[in-house]
Image (cartoon, grey):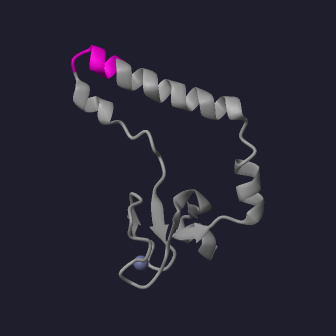
Amino acid sequence: MWVRRTDDELSRERRTPMWAHALGWTLRLLYALACCIRGNPAAFNVNLDPRTVICNKCHRVKMPDAEHTCGCGGMFEDIRDWKWVDESATLS
Ligand SMILES: [Zn+2]
């Protein structure tokens, strides 16, 4: 089940060094360029924006668009603020 990350988890994750973010972006761009060079430009559609949003009520997941309110009445939030937890782990 989806649960919101704690403030401590969020602050720990946001301490990822800037060089690690830069390396990730560089590797994505190199992969996309390599796909183009090898004649597979469709692969250039690699998702360069890893943001995904999740409804804070029904947990429906989608790519961000102009719709900020879910059909269930919940609000879409950055999925990086949430984490998946195995329900059986929470019951023990
Ligand atoms: Zn919803």
Percent position (x, y) of residue 35? 31, 21
**Residue 14 on the magenta segment:** no
The quarter holding residue 40 reads top left
- State left or right for residue 1 relative to residue 37: right
- State left or right for residue 69 relative to residue 16: left
Q: Residue at x 39, y 65 (%)?
A: 66
Please give the range of residues in magenta. 34-39
Main SS class of the magenta portion in the image: helix
The quarter holding residue 3 reads bottom right
Percent position (x, y) of residue 70? 40, 77
- State left or right for residue 2 relative to residue 7: left
Quarter of the rendered structure image containing ligand 1: bottom left
The quarter holding residue 68 reads bottom left
Q: Judge whether 43 appears above or below 34 on screen.
A: below
**Residue 37 on the magenta segment:** yes
Q: Judge whether 25 appears above or below 92 on screen.
A: above
